[in-house]
Amino acid sequence: MLLRGVLLALQALQLAGALDLPAGSCAFEESTCGFDSVLAFLPWILNEEGHYIYVDTSFGKQGEKAVLLSSDLQAEEWSCLRLVYQITMSSESLSDPSQLNLYMRFEDESFDRLLWSAKEPSDSWLIASLDLQNSSKKFKILIEGVLGQGNTASIALFEIKMTTGYCIECDFEENHLCGFVNRWNPNVNWFVGGGSIRNVHSILPQDHTFKSELGHYMYVDSVYVKHFQEVAQLISPLTTAPMAGCLSFYYQIQQGNDNVFSVYTRDVAGLYEEIWKVDRPGNAAWNLAEVEFNAPYPMEVIFEVAFNGPKGGYVALDDISFSPVTCQNQTQLLFSAMEVSCNFEQDLCNFYQDKEGPGWTRVKVKPNMYRAGDHTTGFGYYLLANTKFTSQPGYIGRLYGPSLPGNLQYCLRFHYAIYGFLKMSDTLAVYIFEENHVVQEKVWSVLESPRGVWMQAEITFKKPMPTKVVFMSLCKSFWDCGLVALDDITVQLGSCSSSEKLLPPPGECTFEQDECAFTQEKRNRSSWHRRRGETPTSYTGPKGDHTTGVGYYMYIEASHMVYGQKARLLYRPLRGVSGKHCLTFFYHMYGGGTGLLSVYLKKEDDSEESLLWRRRGEQSISWLRALIEYSCERQHQIIFEAIRGVSIRSDIAIDDVKFQAGPCGEVEDTTQQSSGYSEDLNEIEY
């Protein structure tokens, strides 16, 4: 069902290297190059005339999948995976488009890692570029097409190519230009110059790569400039893995006083930063430019030329490359999120207070009606400040974080809970302290918050100088002083809002968007429900979710069930692999009539299920963490089963489910302390 024009365009492109493609690559000219359709799903069809494979609604209906799986691959060096694809559909079905997903399947993991996803329809082919960090582990590439609504929905793959190197590198010799795109301007644009066909797009006698007239380069000129400061931008693919080092390229410039050649970075929030500009005329030959490039979070590199008039000349660009060392050949120290984050389980990490005496105190308490346990596990440590018995009126407690390098964007996240206080404003505030100045800028404070619930806060900030994050708790008077709790402080590079656009971590579900990979054995009033806030029945269920305090979780509503009735939640089938797996999740079992929560493992072709974990009766008013370590070398499913107890105060909830490859490590299952009624099971192997 693909447009005939697309096929003609592809024939004209003649994508390079079709006969000699590296492992993990295919141009789909005569075969699928070792990429095989998975039989349990719709097949990918090789077009009779070559050039692409596709799946469309003539072979399947809405919601059906076609899955393509590569042979075993390895990327011991940093690699770039490019996918040339197209999604088409009718205009009346834009509300439910087709979707193309790309996963990486490691040999020791039972789940697939989603690397990239797209569902934007297009009349032409598009390019996705994905950086793959070097690893000694073998993996497969899995490509999944999910058909959308309409009679003309189709998904096509024109080329898959995996090459050694970085996706921002390019010599412009291939027709898809390494995924670089020109931001269209009616008057000035970047064009491909050179090549065997000599035409107006060849302003230089030779390129830099081959130093011949047959090689290609990019150029922009001022012939059609009509306005002051007309700008042409050449935009690189978005980086998809953290990288830092030296970005180099070659350029030629016909420079008078009428053009400016600059290089910028732009993050997903649209923030520009200039990293290089021509500061001298240069000569008529190719000039080498080197610039420090730091992309700890997704960024584009933008090559921009601004013309002031039609006599601005031209700028040419070729051979963009990257090296993971600084331009002075010294390894750059990378930011370590581990050093500036803390869950307070062992100590204060790298956080400290500015004075001795009453302040922030590391505590561990048994959860009760008046005070929740810590956020990390439910039975661990957290920080507590401001009690009537230790604080004086006007008391201020300050907690300082470690030093953060300047000129980087940070996302600060932490969990807090407020108890007591008549007026909540400013009971907890966050300041950014610039080390070279005495100035402290308040960037966040509590305005209003439900009492006794762990809430998540997030703050994005960027300062030119080295900074520290300061948490300040204020006790206004003896009559208006309560408790402030703080836990699980994390600092990551990039904007907090940009992380919302990133793909969800593999094998994880917070239930914030939907039910993820879970399905219901049956769906009615007595099944699992996705909810936010408190459950309807008093004295049972959580006050909020575990993730943020205001998000979603899954629970059973006991008032809709009868004593002994079951509700089952099934995770999608997981592949069997050798070695240990670790399943972690948070559960909430509060209420005088609470029943039973169990986790089962069901192996493929087995009629019986094996019990992995179980808790019976009321456990705590807080969210508690469960750790389950198991082994299974056959395809299997994990099943969460909740059974209603003797009364309507029997709501049971789960949140933040996570599957990980490997053993659970040294983390002790502290949830075993939760109740004398626990039925603890030893590690089980199957």
Image: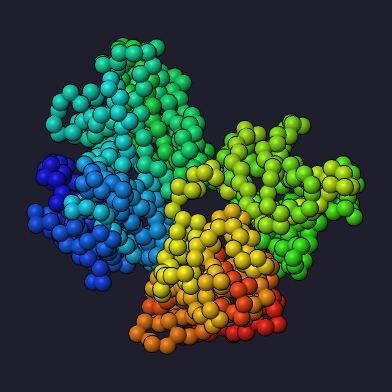
Q: Is residue 319 visible?
A: yes
Q: Image check: 577 left or right of 536?
A: left
Front-most of residues 197 and 236: 236
Which of the 4 image quadrants contains residue 319? top left
Residue ID at (87%, 41%): 394
Residue at 42 percent across and 45 percent down: it is: 239
Residue 515 on image: x %, y %: 45, 63
Q: Position of residue 376 (x, y in %)?
A: 65, 63
Q: Residue at x 28, y 46 (%)?
A: 94
Given residues 32 and 576, the one toward you in this image is: 576
Say whether residue 663 is visible: no
Q: Is residue 58 left or right of residue 105?
A: left
The coloring applied to the image is: rainbow
Image vertical order of residue 500 relative to residue 507, above or below? above
Give the number of marks. Answer: 0
Residue 301 picture quarter: top left
Picture layout, residue 632 above or below residue 79? below
Q: Is residue 534 left or right of residue 227?
A: right
Vertical placement of residue 654 versus 287, above or below: below
Image location of residue 46, percent across then percent down = 15, 59
Q: Nearer the viewer, residue 299 or 573?
A: 573
> What x and y, as percent, mark residue 164?
35, 52
